[in-house]
């Protein structure tokens, strides 16, 4: 399977600041990456689909101006949480997908964001 | 509107016995079904999948069964091991162009030694 890394793994920030989360594909070129969010005791919810070289596609209810996604290369996508608030505290996970065969998605280890 | 339901939030099984995790779905556009395993504070890891053209797929201790007419699938783990204790998510993919996963709510499996 593909190896996906995320950085940072854990971040604590003050309310009103912006936080950037990186998602890297270490051994696979991904034209498409996905960003998910998981609140405690809930399932993973897709936030947006990140396409290399084009604008991300956001799910309903996800503010594109608050969650900025940049997929600048085939191995890197970034999610920036702008003007973070305590309700943005969550576990953010990225994934990349094979474009053929089994359509598996390979997930990064996740980033725990805590906004004070 | 939940398209994917895992009605058992938790399941406890004795080591060595069979674990059966269930998943029901409503979207008839789902044509590929994946199971993921997740430990706390980690990303999900892929476990096993099944295409809608099959009714069974087996990989070692893991077997997934699909009943398309009932829109139901199940994951069987046998024999269960303590290391299998995790949250298991059912995640179908629709046949649309986006090929996005839709995650169920998950089932916490605890295998007791």
Image: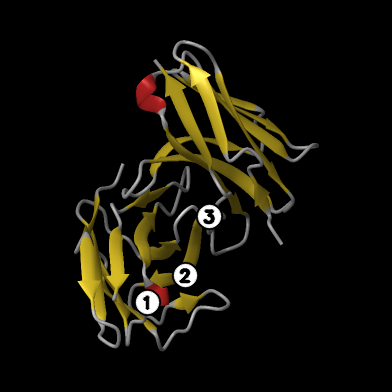
Colour mapping used in the image: secondary structure
Q: Which chain carries label 3?
A: B
Q: How far apart are marks 3 and 1 (CA)?
A: 27 Å
Q: In this view, does B93 lie above or below B62?
A: below
Residue at the spot 58% in from the left edge and 42% down from the top edge: B33
- At x 40%, y 65%, the residue is A35
In the displayed structure, would residue A25 be above or below residue A80? above
* Tag 3 residue: B101
Label 2 close to label 1 by CB (< 8 Å):
no
The residue carrying mark 1 is A86
Crowd rating for badge 1 (residues with CA inside 10 Å; few <14, some 14–19, many 20+): some
- Residue B27 placed where, x, y %? 72, 53
Task: State the residue position of label 2.
Answer: A47
Residue A74 at x, y percent in the picture: 27, 66
Front position among marks 3 and 1:
1
- Which secondary structure, mark 2? strand
User: Label 3 vs label 2: CA separation?
Assistant: 12 Å
Quick one: SS at disc 1? helix
Q: Do the residues labelled 3 and 2 touch (CB within 8 Å)?
A: no
Q: Which of A102 and A112 is in front in this view?
A: A112
Instruction: Give the side of residue A1 with respect to residue B85, left or right.
Output: left
Label 3, residues with CA under 10 Å away: few <14, some 14-19, many ≥20: many
Q: Quadrant of residue B71?
A: top right
> Dot 2 falls on which chain?
A
């Amino acid at each position: 399977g593909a190896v996906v890394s995320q950085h940072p793994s854990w971040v604590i920030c003050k309310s009103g600041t912006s936080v950037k989360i990186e998602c890297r594909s270490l051994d696979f070129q991904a034209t498409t990456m996905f960003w998910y969010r998981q609140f405690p005791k809930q399932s993973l919810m897709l936030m947006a689909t990140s396409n290399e070289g084009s604008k991300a596609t956001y799910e309903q209810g996800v503010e594109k101006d608050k969650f900025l996604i940049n997929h600048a290369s085939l191995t890197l996508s970034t999610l920036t949480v702008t003007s973070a608030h305590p309700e943005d505290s969550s576990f953010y996970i990225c994934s990349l997908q094979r474009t053929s065969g089994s359509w598996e998605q390979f997930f990064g280890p996740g980033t725990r964001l805590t906004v004070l | 509107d939940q398209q994917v339901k895992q009605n058992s939030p938790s399941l406890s099984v004795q080591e060595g016995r069979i674990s059966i995790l269930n998943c029901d779905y409503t979207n008839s556009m789902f044509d590929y079904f994946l199971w993921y395993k997740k430990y706390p504070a980690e990303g999900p890891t892929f476990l096993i999948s099944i295409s809608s053209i099959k009714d069974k797929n087996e990989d070692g201790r893991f077997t997934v069964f699909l009943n398309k007419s009932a829109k139901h699938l199940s994951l069987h783990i046998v024999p269960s091991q303590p290391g299998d204790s995790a949250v298991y998510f059912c995640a179908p993919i629709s046949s649309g162009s986006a090929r996005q996963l839709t995650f169920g709510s998950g089932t916490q499996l605890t295998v007791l030694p």
